[in-house]
Image (cartoon, grey):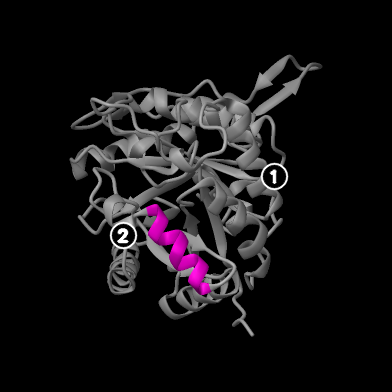
């Protein structure tokens, strides 16, 4: 019998064919790179109770000389907007690099996305490599997201008052790297602010996110990385209960352990591990029952909040959705909350003016 957890949150990392570099060779309809094929994956993940879809965009890196079969062939925020309009519940976390976007434009884009998705959007913040610049960038973006208090817009026809100017807050930021007046021309977020996610690598980047993704590829590395992440969260003055720490997981599923081993061998993971972008996550090769049990054990023993699933192929994605997800001992997260913050049991942020 599986151990019971209060919560186990699940994310689904979206790619056209799977995360294995040669996954396209295993796809049934290799030519189908279109939106409908991606929407079908997202719809299946939503039905299985996943909390969000990750649109990683090769982590915001510029394209290599040759195209990647793993990269999703759409700009992440545009894709998130389209997917959110077709799905009622699941959240979306879209990547955008701080070195490639001005903070005002990024803040406006994600604030707009969050309104389109009715509070189901998150930003995967890709660092610039300059921690001081990134910390200021976070301050500008989150400050712009606080441009209006939740009740700032009155729509009072009788008095002719569109909004209350006293509840509009002009940022007037002048720092080392950025000078931004504000405010945004976007209404407040249904969830206070869009969720902010980061890839944690222990390299000293500021922990400004609500969600941390861990890409460790062994249990030993994951144990150490989880401990480092918890310490980094505390060092930044954040409560552990207010941050979700999720480990990347690469599932290889078979009806028997032997069948799973054969599937793993057929995928030639040794070759994949040597590729330019190896699969970054814990790999579990076994039956659906064993994988569900192992996930539950890892989450309980390491203090993880859940996992981001990186299916190596579309067949493995279908097997996880159909056979593993229903077996997971989860409660308290599936289907709860209309916003992404609600699904992840993150606090609805109070506007700073309301805290005074």
Q: Could one spot residue 243 in this view of the protein? A: no
Mark 1 → mark 2, Cα distance in angstroms: 31 Å
Question: Measured from the top left, where is residue 294 in percent x and y?
Answer: 50, 75
* Residue at 42% from the left image edge and 38% from the top image edge: 142
Q: In the image, which residues are magenta?
A: 257-267
Residue 276 lies, with reference to residue 62, above or below; the image says: below
Above or below for 338 versus 228 = above
Position of residue 221 measured from the top left corner of the image (x, y, whole percent): 28, 69
Contact check, label 1 and label 2, Cβ < 8 Å: no
What's the mark number on residue 340? Answer: none
* Drawn side of residue 141 relative to residue 351, left or right: left
Q: Is residue 335 left or right of residue 158?
A: left
Decide: is 87 above or below 321.
above
Q: Give the label on residue 89, or none.
A: 1
> Label 1: few (<14), some or many (≥20) within 10 Å?
many
Q: Is residue 158 magenta?
A: no
Q: Main secondary structure of the magenta part?
A: helix
Q: Quadrant of residue 176?
A: top left
Residue 236, numbered circle: 2
Tell me residue 90's x, y (percent): 64, 45
Q: Nearer the viewer, residue 102 or 70?
A: 70
- Residue 38 visible in the displayed image: yes
Query: Front-most of 340 and 164?
Result: 340
Q: Tell which residue pokes out farthest to the right in this image.
A: 158
Residue under the image location 30 percent in, 33 percent down: 98
């Amino acid at each position: 019998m599986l151990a019971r957890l209060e919560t186990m949150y699940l994310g689904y990392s979206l790619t056209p064919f799977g995360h294995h570099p040669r996954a396209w060779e295993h796809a049934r309809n290799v030519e189908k790179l279109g939106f409908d094929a991606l929407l079908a994956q997202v719809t299946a993940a939503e039905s299985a109770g996943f909390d969000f879809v990750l649109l990683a965009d090769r982590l915001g890196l510029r394209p290599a000389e040759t195209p990647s079969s793993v990269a999703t062939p759409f700009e992440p925020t545009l894709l998130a907007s389209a997917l959110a309009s077709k799905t009622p519940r699941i959240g979306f976390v879209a990547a955008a690099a701080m070195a490639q976007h001005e903070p005002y434009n990024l803040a406006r884009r994600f604030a707009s996305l969050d309104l389109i998705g009715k509070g189901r959007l998150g930003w995967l913040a890709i660092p610039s490599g300059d921690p001081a610049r990134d910390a200021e960038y976070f301050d500008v973006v989150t400050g712009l997201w606080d441009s209006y208090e939740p009740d700032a817009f009155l729509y009072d026809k009788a008095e002719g008052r569109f909004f209350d100017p006293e509840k509009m807050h002009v940022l007037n930021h002048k720092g080392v790297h950025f000078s931004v007046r504000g405010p945004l021309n976007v209404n407040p977020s249904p969830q206070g602010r869009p969720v902010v996610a980061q890839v944690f690598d222990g390299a000293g980047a500021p922990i400004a996110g609500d969600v941390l993704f861990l890409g460790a590829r062994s249990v030993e590395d994951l144990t150490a990385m989880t401990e480092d992440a918890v310490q980094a969260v505390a060092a930044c003055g954040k409560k552990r209960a207010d941050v979700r720490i999720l480990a990347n997981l690469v599932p290889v599923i078979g009806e028997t352990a032997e069948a799973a081993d054969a599937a793993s061998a057929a995928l030639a993971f040794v070759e994949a591990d040597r590729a330019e972008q190896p699969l970054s996550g814990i790999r579990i090769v076994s039956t659906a029952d064993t994988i569900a049990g192992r996930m539950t054990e890892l989450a309980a023993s390491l203090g993880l909040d859940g996992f981001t699933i990186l299916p190596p192929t579309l067949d493995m994605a279908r097997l996880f959705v159909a056979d593993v997800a229903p077996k997971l001992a989860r409660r308290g997260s599936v289907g709860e909350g209309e916003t992404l913050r609600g699904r992840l049991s993150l606090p609805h942020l109070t506007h700073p003016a309301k805290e005074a």
